[in-house]
Image (cartoon, rainbow, N blue to C red):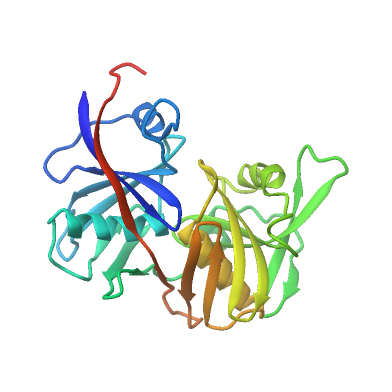
Protein backbone atom coordinates (compact mmCIF):
# COMPACT_ATOMS: atom_id res chain seq x y z
CA UNK A 1 0.00 0.00 0.00
CA UNK A 2 1.38 3.41 -0.98
CA UNK A 3 0.69 6.31 1.36
CA UNK A 4 1.57 10.01 1.36
CA UNK A 5 3.24 11.56 4.38
CA UNK A 6 4.80 14.79 5.62
CA UNK A 7 8.03 14.86 7.62
CA UNK A 8 8.03 17.62 10.27
CA UNK A 9 10.06 18.67 13.27
CA UNK A 10 9.66 20.82 16.34
CA UNK A 11 12.91 21.65 18.17
CA UNK A 12 14.46 18.55 16.62
CA UNK A 13 11.69 16.23 17.81
CA UNK A 14 10.75 14.69 14.45
CA UNK A 15 7.50 13.29 13.16
CA UNK A 16 5.82 11.56 10.28
CA UNK A 17 2.41 13.20 9.82
CA UNK A 18 -0.46 11.32 8.14
CA UNK A 19 -3.70 12.82 6.84
CA UNK A 20 -6.75 10.67 7.61
CA UNK A 21 -9.31 13.45 7.24
CA UNK A 22 -10.83 11.76 4.17
CA UNK A 23 -10.38 8.09 5.04
CA UNK A 24 -8.60 5.85 7.50
CA UNK A 25 -5.39 4.17 6.37
CA UNK A 26 -5.98 1.16 8.61
CA UNK A 27 -2.41 0.96 9.90
CA UNK A 28 -1.35 -1.46 12.62
CA UNK A 29 1.17 -1.03 15.43
CA UNK A 30 3.69 -2.86 13.25
CA UNK A 31 3.11 -0.35 10.45
CA UNK A 32 3.72 2.59 12.80
CA UNK A 33 6.94 0.93 14.04
CA UNK A 34 8.05 0.41 10.44
CA UNK A 35 7.34 4.03 9.47
CA UNK A 36 9.31 5.27 12.48
CA UNK A 37 12.30 3.03 11.74
CA UNK A 38 15.23 5.17 10.60
CA UNK A 39 16.75 2.36 8.50
CA UNK A 40 13.77 0.70 6.81
CA UNK A 41 11.01 3.35 7.04
CA UNK A 42 10.90 7.14 7.02
CA UNK A 43 12.29 7.63 10.51
CA UNK A 44 10.63 9.55 13.34
CA UNK A 45 10.24 9.83 17.09
CA UNK A 46 6.45 9.70 16.72
CA UNK A 47 3.80 9.18 14.04
CA UNK A 48 1.05 11.83 14.13
CA UNK A 49 -2.33 11.27 12.50
CA UNK A 50 -4.83 13.99 11.61
CA UNK A 51 -8.46 12.91 11.76
CA UNK A 52 -11.77 14.79 11.37
CA UNK A 53 -13.54 16.42 14.26
CA UNK A 54 -14.97 13.78 16.63
CA UNK A 55 -17.45 16.16 18.34
CA UNK A 56 -19.01 19.60 18.25
CA UNK A 57 -16.63 22.36 19.31
CA UNK A 58 -13.58 20.33 18.28
CA UNK A 59 -11.67 21.07 15.05
CA UNK A 60 -9.67 17.84 14.65
CA UNK A 61 -8.68 14.61 16.34
CA UNK A 62 -4.94 14.18 16.92
CA UNK A 63 -3.66 10.59 17.26
CA UNK A 64 -0.09 9.86 18.40
CA UNK A 65 1.94 6.68 18.08
CA UNK A 66 5.41 6.35 19.54
CA UNK A 67 8.27 4.79 17.61
CA UNK A 68 7.51 1.45 19.30
CA UNK A 69 4.02 1.46 17.72
CA UNK A 70 2.11 2.15 20.92
CA UNK A 71 -0.59 4.83 20.97
CA UNK A 72 0.06 7.51 23.60
CA UNK A 73 -1.94 10.27 25.19
CA UNK A 74 -0.04 13.43 24.33
CA UNK A 75 2.90 14.97 22.47
CA UNK A 76 3.57 18.68 22.88
CA UNK A 77 6.11 19.24 20.11
CA UNK A 78 3.86 17.19 17.86
CA UNK A 79 0.92 19.44 18.72
CA UNK A 80 2.76 22.42 17.29
CA UNK A 81 3.58 20.49 14.11
CA UNK A 82 -0.03 19.31 13.94
CA UNK A 83 -1.26 22.92 13.92
CA UNK A 84 1.28 23.92 11.29
CA UNK A 85 0.31 20.92 9.14
CA UNK A 86 -3.44 21.52 9.05
CA UNK A 87 -2.92 25.19 8.25
CA UNK A 88 -0.30 24.62 5.51
CA UNK A 89 -2.37 21.86 3.89
CA UNK A 90 -5.48 24.04 3.77
CA UNK A 91 -7.46 21.89 6.20
CA UNK A 92 -8.33 24.98 8.25
CA UNK A 93 -8.04 28.76 8.05
CA UNK A 94 -8.07 29.22 11.82
CA UNK A 95 -5.12 30.48 13.85
CA UNK A 96 -6.42 28.89 17.06
CA UNK A 97 -7.64 25.30 17.15
CA UNK A 98 -9.32 22.94 19.58
CA UNK A 99 -7.89 19.48 19.13
CA UNK A 100 -8.93 16.20 20.76
CA UNK A 101 -6.15 13.89 21.93
CA UNK A 102 -6.24 10.68 23.92
CA UNK A 103 -5.09 12.77 26.91
CA UNK A 104 -7.71 15.51 26.52
CA UNK A 105 -8.41 18.68 24.53
CA UNK A 106 -5.53 21.01 23.70
CA UNK A 107 -5.53 24.41 21.99
CA UNK A 108 -2.66 25.22 19.60
CA UNK A 109 -2.34 28.78 18.29
CA UNK A 110 -0.21 29.88 15.33
CA UNK A 111 1.63 33.10 16.21
CA UNK A 112 2.65 35.94 13.84
CA UNK A 113 6.36 35.26 14.49
CA UNK A 114 6.05 31.73 13.06
CA UNK A 115 6.08 29.91 16.36
CA UNK A 116 3.16 27.94 17.75
CA UNK A 117 1.78 28.32 21.27
CA UNK A 118 -0.14 25.41 22.76
CA UNK A 119 -2.46 25.45 25.74
CA UNK A 120 -1.44 22.09 27.19
CA UNK A 121 -4.10 22.04 29.89
CA UNK A 122 -3.62 21.62 33.62
CA UNK A 123 -0.93 19.40 35.09
CA UNK A 124 -2.15 16.40 37.06
CA UNK A 125 -0.66 15.57 40.46
CA UNK A 126 -3.01 12.86 41.75
CA UNK A 127 -0.89 9.73 41.87
CA UNK A 128 -3.75 7.38 40.93
CA UNK A 129 -4.39 9.39 37.75
CA UNK A 130 -0.69 9.07 36.87
CA UNK A 131 -0.80 5.31 37.54
CA UNK A 132 2.05 5.66 40.05
CA UNK A 133 2.18 3.19 42.95
CA UNK A 134 3.58 5.02 45.98
CA UNK A 135 2.72 2.30 48.48
CA UNK A 136 5.34 2.03 51.25
CA UNK A 137 7.38 4.90 49.78
CA UNK A 138 8.30 7.89 51.94
CA UNK A 139 8.38 11.13 49.93
CA UNK A 140 10.92 13.84 50.65
CA UNK A 141 9.53 17.35 51.08
CA UNK A 142 10.99 19.98 48.77
CA UNK A 143 9.67 23.52 48.34
CA UNK A 144 5.89 23.31 48.42
CA UNK A 145 5.92 19.78 47.02
CA UNK A 146 7.71 16.46 47.27
CA UNK A 147 10.01 14.04 45.49
CA UNK A 148 9.69 10.26 45.48
CA UNK A 149 12.61 7.84 45.96
CA UNK A 150 12.83 5.27 43.16
CA UNK A 151 15.18 2.33 43.64
CA UNK A 152 16.43 1.31 40.21
CA UNK A 153 16.85 -2.36 39.28
CA UNK A 154 20.02 -3.87 37.85
CA UNK A 155 22.33 -1.13 39.10
CA UNK A 156 25.63 -1.88 40.82
CA UNK A 157 26.18 -0.25 43.21
CA UNK A 158 22.47 0.20 43.92
CA UNK A 159 21.03 3.50 42.68
CA UNK A 160 18.03 5.36 44.12
CA UNK A 161 16.89 8.56 42.43
CA UNK A 162 14.51 11.27 43.62
CA UNK A 163 11.74 12.04 41.14
CA UNK A 164 8.97 14.62 40.98
CA UNK A 165 5.96 12.78 39.57
CA UNK A 166 3.18 14.38 37.53
CA UNK A 167 1.23 14.11 34.29
CA UNK A 168 0.83 16.47 31.34
CA UNK A 169 -1.70 14.13 29.75
CA UNK A 170 1.09 11.53 29.88
CA UNK A 171 3.19 10.48 32.90
CA UNK A 172 6.52 12.12 33.78
CA UNK A 173 9.22 11.58 36.38
CA UNK A 174 11.49 14.63 36.64
CA UNK A 175 14.96 14.36 38.17
CA UNK A 176 17.23 17.25 39.17
CA UNK A 177 20.81 16.91 37.90
CA UNK A 178 23.91 19.08 38.22
CA UNK A 179 24.78 18.89 34.52
CA UNK A 180 22.62 17.42 31.74
CA UNK A 181 25.71 16.82 29.60
CA UNK A 182 27.11 14.31 32.09
CA UNK A 183 23.78 12.93 33.36
CA UNK A 184 23.46 9.15 32.88
CA UNK A 185 20.41 9.47 30.61
CA UNK A 186 21.22 6.44 28.45
CA UNK A 187 21.79 4.21 31.49
CA UNK A 188 19.12 5.43 33.91
CA UNK A 189 16.46 6.52 31.40
CA UNK A 190 15.31 3.00 30.45
CA UNK A 191 15.29 1.89 34.10
CA UNK A 192 13.06 4.81 35.08
CA UNK A 193 10.84 4.46 31.99
CA UNK A 194 10.11 0.82 32.84
CA UNK A 195 10.06 1.18 36.63
CA UNK A 196 7.42 -1.20 38.04
CA UNK A 197 5.81 1.56 40.10
CA UNK A 198 4.58 3.18 36.87
CA UNK A 199 1.83 0.94 35.51
CA UNK A 200 1.86 2.66 32.09
CA UNK A 201 5.62 3.33 32.02
CA UNK A 202 6.88 6.90 32.29
CA UNK A 203 8.85 9.63 30.53
CA UNK A 204 12.09 10.34 32.40
CA UNK A 205 13.22 13.99 32.49
CA UNK A 206 16.69 15.13 33.56
CA UNK A 207 16.58 18.84 34.48
CA UNK A 208 19.47 21.19 35.21
CA UNK A 209 18.37 24.50 36.76
CA UNK A 210 20.54 27.39 35.52
CA UNK A 211 18.59 30.15 37.24
CA UNK A 212 14.95 30.88 38.06
CA UNK A 213 14.07 31.53 34.41
CA UNK A 214 16.28 29.05 32.56
CA UNK A 215 16.75 25.29 32.57
CA UNK A 216 18.51 22.72 30.43
CA UNK A 217 16.65 19.48 29.81
CA UNK A 218 17.06 15.99 28.40
CA UNK A 219 14.17 13.52 28.24
CA UNK A 220 14.17 9.76 27.77
CA UNK A 221 10.73 9.31 26.25
CA UNK A 222 8.46 6.38 26.89
CA UNK A 223 8.51 4.17 23.79
CA UNK A 224 10.94 6.38 21.86
CA UNK A 225 14.15 6.69 23.88
CA UNK A 226 16.00 9.98 24.24
CA UNK A 227 14.79 12.60 21.77
CA UNK A 228 16.21 16.02 20.90
CA UNK A 229 13.22 17.65 22.59
CA UNK A 230 10.03 16.65 24.41
CA UNK A 231 7.28 19.24 24.70
CA UNK A 232 5.29 17.60 27.48
CA UNK A 233 8.61 16.81 29.18
CA UNK A 234 9.54 20.50 29.13
CA UNK A 235 6.11 21.38 30.56
CA UNK A 236 6.45 18.75 33.28
CA UNK A 237 9.99 19.86 34.18
CA UNK A 238 9.03 23.52 34.52
CA UNK A 239 5.91 22.73 36.54
CA UNK A 240 7.98 20.50 38.81
CA UNK A 241 10.63 23.20 39.20
CA UNK A 242 8.00 25.79 40.10
CA UNK A 243 6.38 23.54 42.70
CA UNK A 244 9.80 22.66 44.13
CA UNK A 245 10.44 26.38 44.60
CA UNK A 246 13.25 26.60 42.07
CA UNK A 247 11.68 28.44 39.09
CA UNK A 248 9.60 31.48 38.22
CA UNK A 249 6.31 31.36 36.32
CA UNK A 250 7.86 31.71 32.83
CA UNK A 251 10.92 29.66 31.91
CA UNK A 252 13.02 28.99 28.83
CA UNK A 253 13.76 25.26 28.57
CA UNK A 254 16.86 24.63 26.48
CA UNK A 255 16.65 21.20 24.89
CA UNK A 256 19.21 19.61 22.59
CA UNK A 257 16.97 20.57 19.67
CA UNK A 258 16.39 24.18 20.69
CA UNK A 259 14.51 26.39 23.16
CA UNK A 260 10.91 26.06 24.33
CA UNK A 261 9.14 28.70 26.41
CA UNK A 262 6.94 27.31 29.18
CA UNK A 263 4.60 29.37 31.35
CA UNK A 264 2.52 28.22 34.33
CA UNK A 265 0.83 30.50 36.87
CA UNK A 266 0.31 27.67 39.35
CA UNK A 267 -2.74 26.35 41.17
CA UNK A 268 -5.52 25.62 38.65
CA UNK A 269 -3.82 27.31 35.68
CA UNK A 270 -3.13 25.73 32.31
CA UNK A 271 0.42 25.26 31.06
CA UNK A 272 1.34 27.27 27.96
CA UNK A 273 4.13 26.03 25.68
CA UNK A 274 5.61 28.07 22.81
CA UNK A 275 8.15 26.88 20.27
CA UNK A 276 9.01 26.21 16.61
CA UNK A 277 7.35 23.85 14.14
CA UNK A 278 8.40 23.32 10.53
CA UNK A 279 7.91 21.05 7.54
CA UNK A 280 11.00 19.14 6.40
CA UNK A 281 9.75 17.35 3.28
CA UNK A 282 6.81 15.55 1.66
CA UNK A 283 6.89 12.02 0.32
CA UNK A 284 5.20 8.77 -0.57
CA UNK A 285 6.19 5.34 0.62
CA UNK A 286 5.10 1.76 -0.04
CA UNK A 287 4.21 0.04 3.22
CA UNK A 288 4.65 -3.76 3.32
CA UNK A 289 1.36 -5.57 3.81
CA UNK A 290 2.83 -8.18 6.13
CA UNK A 291 5.15 -7.10 8.95
Q: Residue furthest right?
A: 157
Task: Tell me if residue 41 can be seen.
Answer: yes
**Residue 144 x %, y %:** 66, 80
Residue 124 visible, this orientation: no
The spot of residue 146 in percent (x, y) is 69, 70
Q: Position of residue 23 (x, y in %)?
A: 13, 38
| Residue 7, position as x, y percentages in the image | 32, 44
Residue in the image at 30% along x and 19% along y = 288
Furthest toward the top, the residue is: 290
The quadrant of the rendering that contains the N terminus is top left
Question: In the drawing, does residue 90 fall left or right of residue 139?
Answer: left
Q: Residue at x 41, y 31 (%)?
A: 33
The number of numbered discs placed on residues in the rendered structure image is 0
Q: Quadrant of residue 193?
A: top right
* Residue sitting nearer the eye, 47 or 70: 47
- In percent of the image, x 13 and y 55: which residue is there? 91
In this rendering, position of residue 61 left or right of residue 56:
right
Residue in front for this viewpoint, 268 or 11:
11
Query: In this view, which residue lies farthest toward the front?
Result: 281
Question: Could you tell me which quadrant the C terminus lies in?
Answer: top left
- Out of 227 and 152, give the one closest to the viewer: 227
* Residue sitting nearer the eye, 13 or 74: 13
Amino acid sequence: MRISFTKMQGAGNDFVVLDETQQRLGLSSAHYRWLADRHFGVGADQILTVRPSPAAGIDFEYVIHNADGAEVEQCGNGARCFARFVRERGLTSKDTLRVQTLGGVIEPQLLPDGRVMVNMGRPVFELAAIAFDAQHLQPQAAGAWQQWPLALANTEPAVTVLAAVLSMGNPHAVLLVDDVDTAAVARLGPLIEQHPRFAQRVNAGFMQVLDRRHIRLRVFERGAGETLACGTGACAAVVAGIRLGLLDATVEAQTRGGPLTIAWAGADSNVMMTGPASTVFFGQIDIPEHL
